[in-house]
Amino acid sequence: MSALGSCIQWLGLVKEAPARERTLRIAKRSIASINEMVAELLEYTRTSWAAGSM
């Protein structure tokens, strides 16, 4: 989350297009990674509860 916040702040400061594009790619990759981790955590929780492990 920290990296994502930094990317967003950086986007507000950078004027050069290549740097903005690179920062945007990094932010998008971070968001995708976070989404994947949350989905995996939710799936783990669902399967654990279904199996009665929790």
Image (cartoon, rainbow, N blue to C red):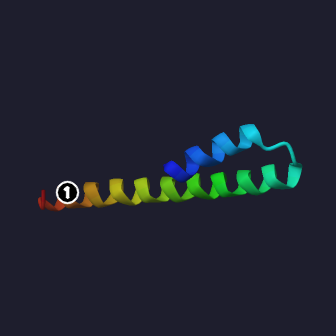
Q: Position of residue 21 (x, y in %)?
A: 80, 53
**Quadrant holding the C terminus:** bottom left
Give the quarter of the image for residue 48: bottom left
Dot 1, how many residues are within 10 Å of its Cα: few (below 14), some (14-19), or many (20+)?
A: few
Residue underneath mark 1:
50
Extreme residue in the front direction: 13
Query: Circle 1 sits in a helix, a strand or a loop, which is it?
Result: helix
Three-letter amino acid code at the position of disc 1: Ala
Residue closest to the eye, 41 or 18: 18
Give left or right: position of 39 versus 51.
right
Residue at figure coordinates x 64%, y 52% from the top left: 27
Give the residue drawn at x 59%, y 47%.
6
- Viewed as shown, does residue 51 lie left or right of 2? left
Most foreground residue, 42 or 30? 30
**Picture coordinates of residue 36, whole percent (x, y):** 48, 59
Give the camera-side residue of 43 and 29: 29
- Total labels: the figure holds 1
* Quadrant of the image occupied by residue 50: bottom left
Q: Residue sitting at 64 percent across and 48 percent down?
A: 7
Relative to 8, residue 40 above or below: below
Residue at 50% of width from left, 53% of height from top? Answer: 35
In the picture provided, is 18 more to the left or to the right than 38? right
22 sits left or right of 3 in the view: right
